[in-house]
């Protein structure tokens, strides 16, 4: 199973959301599982589509069959898409909730030692859960095993920030990530 993430900034949010909602049942038929669409908190035109697939090949076959029609309908032809294929390292087995009003927090960082990062993550899961994290999981990028994607559901951005302020330094020391550049995205579920 792989987690596929497409990110793109769209010119027409309503048109894009409508196209995604129409595509979801077709992607289900092609083998996608637990799909979701999110908008970035910092820019509501930045979209992230997440879906669990049996394999990278299954996603590619669906994209080849439906991608052109989808892009025409969504108004995204020629846009710069960021695609990541993530392989689960640790944490929740199912990444995408079926119906959850919380925010999705995504961290992305390239680490020197993925196994050390995984161990630090596993050691911190009960603390994160007690702070309110749900469905926390970490993934390695298919294109770079040192690039880590960390996804967790939180009741709010503020709840995640409070946990990070309390536990962040100790986690980074355990994970060996002090001083690294972390990308943080707060996503709000649209579909």
Image (tube, rainbow, N blue to C red):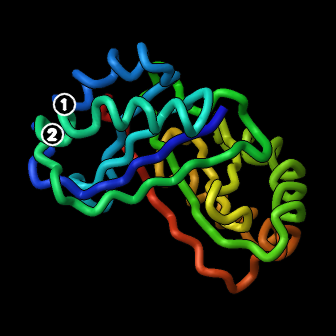
Q: Residue at x 72, y 33 (%)?
A: 92
Which callout, 1 or 2, points at the residue further toward the start of the chain?
1
**Label 2: element kind:** helix
Camera-side residue of 114 and 136: 114
The answer to whether residue 38 is above or below residue 21 is below
Answer with the quarter of the image where residue 55 lies.
top right
Q: Residue at x 21, y 39 (%)?
A: 68
Answer with the quarter of the image where residue 95 lies.
top right
Camera-side residue of 112 and 157: 112
**Badge 2 is on which residue?**
74
**Label 2 crowd bin: few (<14), some (14–19), many (20+), radius 10 Å:** many
x and y percentages locating residue 38 in the rendered image: 36, 41
**Residue 19 — which label?**
1
Q: Give me the C-alpha separation between circle 1 and circle 2.
A: 5 Å
x and y percentages locating residue 98 in the rendered image: 48, 19
The answer to whether residue 190 is above or below residue 115 is above
């Amino acid at each position: 199973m792989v987690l596929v993430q497409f990110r793109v900034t769209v010119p027409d949010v309503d048109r894009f959301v409508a196209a995604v909602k129409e595509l979801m049942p077709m992607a289900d038929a092609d083998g996608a599982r637990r799909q979701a669409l999110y908008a970035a908190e910092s820019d509501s035109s930045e979209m992230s589509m997440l879906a669990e697939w049996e394999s990278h090949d299954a996603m590619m076959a669906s994209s080849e069959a439906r991608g052109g029609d989808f892009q025409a309908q969504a108004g995204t032809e020629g846009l710069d898409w960021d695609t990541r294929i993530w392989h689960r390292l640790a944490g929740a087995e199912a990444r995408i909730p079926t119906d959850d009003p919380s925010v999705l927090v995504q961290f992305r960082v390239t680490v020197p030692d993925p196994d050390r990062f995984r161990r630090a993550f596993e050691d911190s899961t009960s603390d994160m859960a007690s702070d309110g994290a749900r469905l926390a999981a970490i993934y390695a990028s298919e294109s770079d095993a040192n690039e880590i994607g960390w996804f967790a559901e939180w009741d709010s951005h503020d709840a995640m920030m409070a946990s990070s302020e309390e536990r962040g330094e100790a986690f980074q020391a355990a994970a060996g990530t002090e001083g690294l550049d972390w990308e943080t995205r707060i996503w709000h579920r649209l579909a």
